[in-house]
Every structure is written in C-alpha cells, then in structure tokens.
Image (spheres, helix red, strand yellow):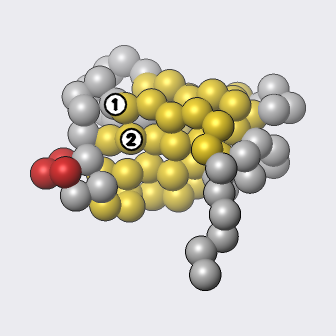
Amino acid sequence: MCPRVTHSDFCVSPNGEYLVIGSDNGALIVLNLKNQTFALEEIYEEHNSGVRGVTWLPGKTPSFASIDSTGGLYLWK
C-alpha cells in the first residue's frame, strides 16, 4: 500500500518538461513530463514541515524554490 501524501502546492517548469509537487509531509516530488510519461525524476525530503509553496526559478538550468510551514526556504537544482 502506498503512503497517503496530500499535496499543498505544485508548479510546472517554464519549459513544460517538469512538475514539482510539494506535500504536507515535507517531501518534494519532481515528475518528468516529457512525452507525457510522468516519470518520477526525484524525491527530496529535506523539509522538516509541510511544504506550502513551490516555484520554478528563471534560467537555463532547471531549478526551483520551496518554502515550508515554519518559513524554511530551500533552493534546488
């Protein structure tokens, strides 16, 4: 059985190739949207509380920022 994860925010990359999902348990899930496969690209579990916001950052290298319910701000590449 898969653990129940409730998303709190999500954002598609500017090029439309990735989707990042922030969850209430503090995890960030990155899916690859190329060819409509929705393949799991990466899971980050560094947040100590629920993720409240995610956004992609401008630039050539895919990177994004996330913030959790305690105000912890993280930058990801």
Q: Is 70 on the left-hand or right-hand side of 47?
A: right
- Rendered view: 6 above or below 57: below
Relative depth, front residue between 47 and 34:
34
Residue 72 is marked as: none
Residue at the spot x=43%, y=26% of the render?
56
- Rendered view: 20 above or below 16: below
Return the x and y of residue 20 as percentages of the image width and height.
46, 41
Return the x and y of residue 71 as percentages of the image width and height.
81, 26
Q: What separation in Å lies between label 2 and label 1 (alpha carbons)?
A: 6 Å
Relative depth, front residue between 51 and 76:
51
Residue at the spot x=37%, y=51% of the render?
31
Quarter of the image holding residue 49?
top right
Q: Amino acid at mark 1?
A: Ser
The answer to whether any part of residue 46 appears in the image is no
- Circle 2 is placed at which residue position? 19
- Crowd around label 2: few <14 · some 14–19 · many ≥20 (10 Å): some
Figure quadrant of the C terminus: top left
Return the x and y of residue 25 as percentages of the image width and height.
74, 52
Figure quadrant of the N terminus: bottom right
- Circle 1 is placed at which residue position? 13
- Rendered view: 15 above or below 43: above
Residue at the spot x=58%, y=48% of the render?
28
Q: Are marks 2 and 1 in contact (CB under 8 Å)?
A: yes
Q: Amino acid at mark 2?
A: Leu
The answer to whether any part of residue 12 appears in the image is yes
Q: Is 76 on the left-hand or right-hand side of 38?
A: right
Numbered disc 2: secondary structure = strand
